Amino acid sequence: MNSLVAVILGIVTVYLAYTRYARRIDRNVIQSDPKRATPATLYMDGVDFMPTNRNILFGYHFKSIAAAGPIVGAIVAATLWGWLPALVWLIVGVSFMGWASDYSAIVLSVRNEGNSLSAVAHRLISPRTRTVLFLFIFFYLLLIAGAFVGIMASVLESQPRTHLGMILLVMMGLLLGQMLYRWRIGLLAATVLTVGVTLAAILTGSLTEGAFKGFNEILNGITDGAPIVTYFDPTLAGFKGAEAQIMPSLLFWAAAICVFCYAGSVLPIWRMAQPVVYVGFWITALAMILGLTGAALGTLVKPEVAQFQIPAFKGWNPQLGPSGIMPLWPMLFVTIACGAISGWHALFGAVGTARQIENEADMLPVGAGSMFAEFLLGLLALLAISVGAKGSPVAAFANGLGGFISVWGIPLEHASSLAFAAFIVIVLVVTQLIFRVMRVTLTEWLGEVIPPLRNQHVASIISVALAILLVMTGTWIYLWQLFGAANQLMAALSLLLVTIWLASVGKEWLYAGLPMIFMYVTTVASILVTAYNLYFNVYLPNIVARRMLPAVGSGLMVLVSVLLVVAALLIGLDGWRAFVKYLGRPAPAAGPAPARG
Amino acid sequence: MTGYEFARHALEMRREMESVFLVLTIGDLIGAPVLPPIYTLRLLPYLAPEVARWKRQMARRKEFWEKEEYDLHGV
């Protein structure tokens, strides 16, 4: 098997699923009407409701949804079960479920005056659904924060050549914000300067590698080489589990990431978050475009970088630690959290994007099209890990992607540096925004009951502290799968809303209802499996060995698992009652649709 | 396309300042009288085109992630 075959499979999947299935649903079920007014054209306030050209909206929506999910998920899934199950889930998931979730969430919002999913849930299901969703969102964000900070800290600690690039990224981001909003310098000049300097720093990171390595050694010398925390990692020693250590250098880089995220959370968005994301986007886009085209051409031009190295299938239930279980169902379907289907796209993309849809005919190319583009991103990550099986999963991904980029004549060392940097950038830019939303969610949820949480610094510090606690438990893989489960559960809830809405307006609901049932059952089962693994593989061994910090962290995660299941069951129960109520009613008489002026 | 989010964010910042200005000048239209009516009436011809849009914006229920500086759209 080689990357060209996989790329062709991916393109054929996108073509068939979009033209044969998605378009049919858009035409026959949703019946999108180009003459019907959308909220953007009805309300047009120039800010929240602003009709936007579909090509710009596609880019904006894709950039909002593309993050580390499809990349890290594909890496972990291929490592656990082999490349074949991961490829099959990516293809089947996006073809029947992923596009339906993203597209339908946008349709739901457009046809309901641009209201958010939680506002529609309040009306269609019950008021408590909105409250439960708040709870759900906060813990979901906490899991993402812990997972992303953990993986970035370990990559930064082990790859000193990436440090110069990341430091310059932050500095150039701050400079870009100042140049655009305060000094009013043109976008083109500002982009060329900031992106150019960041790219140069990434490619020349090896020059400062020795210095940063020495810095790590100085940090570890503070404790004379002794670890801060020792924990049991079930993924080590060929998944039999072994002792692992958190050294001062790892804690330093985790804290550095958290300081960056704290700043991103409390500073105005134009000062840091937005320009850093903008600079990072250029780096990532460059790496992904060169990588995807290199993957396609590699088989012909440089075959040694395009042949799959890892096994196609490693088993139905690979052993993970002495007492862990990792059955293909349901765990594969939550390990690849994005790329196949994702609830986060529905939650945020629907509100921002749906209010900018100019014409109902744009809903499909923007919503479904972006999801298919994210599928290609996940496919690229899968190809990279499948061909570059050396070192840790992230190193294997970077080596694989670096190999694809090198097809264009860039030396492999620089190509790998670019690939590493692209990975860190794509995770870093999302993480700082997650802490911002976490801070706001905490304030919104508990600010009335605990007034200090209304202070943005208090809420940010608490969010950061909770994330660091999760990192210190050393249970990254379970954290990732718990995040994946929460994300997919959000997709199931979004599909549930869409199903209920379709039933309430007398439309055919099966295309959303069937994926909803599958995702709902799968994600609840996966949360229970992860809770089991956490309890027997992590919590109990740490309690026995009297390692309180990892025990507390893993105990917290078991508690979060239980809360997620309870939240899902509550929403499911209320949703079922609402569905039965609407199914029994006759379809409402269709009034005249608001026409475009 | 690359500058879209910056343009949009700049528009949002301007809209927020305009919204504060409108609350100060014609706030009694939404039950928050600030300026004495004589001054409101003098400014009304200039502000009339914005009234409907502004009232709808003020009355629309916002999720917490849509509030100023919290939203994620474009990033």
Image (tube, rainbow, N blue to C red):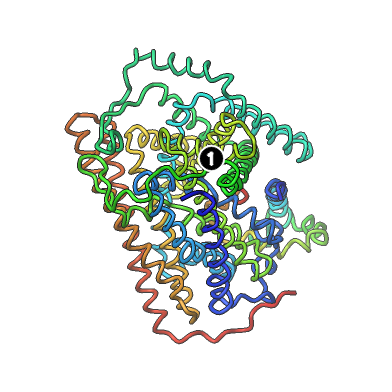
Looking at the image, residue A284 lies above or below residue A525: above
Q: Can I make out residue A556 in this image? A: yes
Residue A523 shown left or right of residue A185 in the figure? left
Residue A246 shown left or right of residue B65 in the figure? left
Residue A164: percent from left, percent from top: 58, 25
Work out whether residue A373 or residue A103 is closer to the camera in this orientation and state it.
Answer: A373
Q: Residue furthest left?
A: A544
**Which chain is disc 1 placed on?**
A
Indicate the secondary structure of the residue bearing disc 1: helix
Residue A5 shown left or right of residue A591 in the figure? left
Work out whether residue A393 or residue A568 is closer to the camera in this orientation and state it.
Answer: A393
Crowding at dot 1, Cα within 10 Å, few <14 / some 14-19 / many 20+, comes out as many
Work out whether residue B56 or residue A189 is closer to the camera in this orientation and state it.
Answer: A189
User: Which residue carries the number 1 mark?
Assistant: A401
Residue A232: percent from left, percent from top: 26, 32
Residue B21: percent from left, percent from top: 72, 50
Residue for point 35% across, 72% down: A576
Identify the amino acid type marked 1.
Answer: Leu
Residue for point 61% across, 66% down: A363
Residue A419: percent from left, percent from top: 55, 36
Residue A148, picture quadrant: top left
Q: Can I make out residue A447 in this image? A: no
Quarter that holds the C terminus of chain A? bottom right
